[in-house]
Amino acid sequence: MIPSPSKQAYVPFVSVANMMKLVHALGIERVLRDLVEEIEADFLRWGEFDKTPRIASHSDVGVIELMPTSDGETYGFKYVNGHPSNTKAGLQTVTAFGLLADVATGYPLLLSEMTILTALRTAATSAMAAKWLAPKGATTMALIGNGAQAEFQALGFKAVCGITDVRLYDIDSEATRKCSANLAGRGLRVHACATAQEAIMGAQIITTVTADKLYATILTDNMVGEGVHINAVGGDCPGKTELHRDILLRSGIFVEYPPQTRIEGEIQQLDADYPVTELWQVIAGHATGRRDAKQITLFDSVGFAIEDFSALRYVRSKLQETGFFDTLDMIADPDDPRDLFGMLLRSQG
């Protein structure tokens, strides 16, 4: 049984092992579709949430961030890092964990790994944006950057948008080989490409998801033709971009939370008042998404705390059904809440 928040001595904990079991039990494509529904539902109540740019501690080699939010009933945060050079030491570029708490009592409701969950919710958010912005009937996606996030993106676009063909490119051919092998038998036609230019040929959707923390030009202006949807995922902190500035000037730009995206996203290359559209407004019907078949749409994705909140609530909702969790003794629970010291004394015996 999941402990009740009203009288709770133990906190449900989803480890990496249990997260993987949960995803396998439900099916990864079902999880991705479910996460899209959860995130859309929370975007539709955007005004209920506390919103702030994530709190970042930058260093020369990476960043460590906290991403908090609350809807007034439940509070959530994610701890996440981004260290691109970690892979050289055999470590993950991104690791994360997250917590939900009951606003009424302050008691934690869930502690969970979020390295895998972040990959899932990032892919779900990308696919959700494309659902609203990509050209109708899109079947082919170019996936530039074939690292840890790539397979999740490919399967998210298959599950949510009906993509049938994925064209892969990475400067590291071993990453492309890895991605191709992992996607084998998943119902996608996978094409390994020798250059980024080759990868985008015939693609209606272009996803860039590279890791290096630098101002990069993964796509130049002449590479991008009219009518495509660009899903820019890799530019997600100050000093880290993937697209040439001229592409932005030709595109309708959609973002999660402008005060954060202007610091971290592709639009850090533009003036602070350059017009962008918040994605939640499109989903709620308050703003137009794609105007016409010739428009270039750009989702400048940096990740936002509400998406993590949605993902954590989704996982918590599946614990009773799946049983894939442990419990942690995280909350001191003396018989008399005023006698914490007495509880400590009695533990000696």
Image: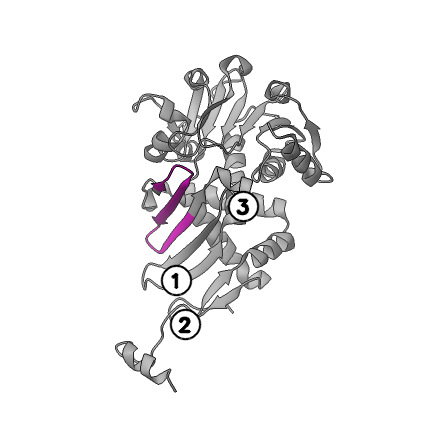
Q: Is residue 181 left or right of residue 225?
A: right
The image quadrant that residue 248 belongs to is top left
Examine the rendering and report whether any part of residue 252 can be seen.
yes
- Residue at the image point whose x is 53% and y is 59% from the top: 15
Which is more N-terminal, label 1 or label 3?
3
Residue 108 tag number: 1
Examine the rendering and report whether any part of residue 335 can be seen.
no
Choose mark 2 or mark 3, whichever is in front: 3
Q: Which three-letter amino acid code belongs to the residue tagged 1? A: Pro
Is mark 2 in CB contact (under 8 Å) with mark 3?
Answer: no
Choose mark 3 or mark 1, whichever is in front: 3
Looking at the rendering, in which quadrant would you find the C terminus? bottom left
Q: Which three-letter amino acid code belongs to the residue tagged 2? A: Ala
- Residue at the image point whose x is 36% and y is 26% from the top: 268
What's the CA distance linking mark 2 and mark 3?
34 Å
| Residue hosting label 3 | 91
Q: Is residue 193 left or right of residue 320?
A: right
Instruction: Work out whether residue 128 or residue 69 is closer to the camera in this orientation and state it.
Output: 69
**Label 1 SS:** strand
Which is more N-terminal, label 3 or label 2?
2
Q: Which three-letter amino acid code belongs to the residue tagged 3? A: Leu
What's the CA distance linking mark 3 and mark 1?
29 Å
How many neighbours does mark 1 have within 10 angstroms: few (below 14), some (14-19), or many (20 or more)? Answer: many
Instruction: Work out whether residue 75 or residue 349 is closer to the camera in this orientation and state it.
Output: 349
Q: Is residue 232 left or right of residue 106?
A: right
| Residue hosting label 2 | 9
Image: magenta residue range:
57-79
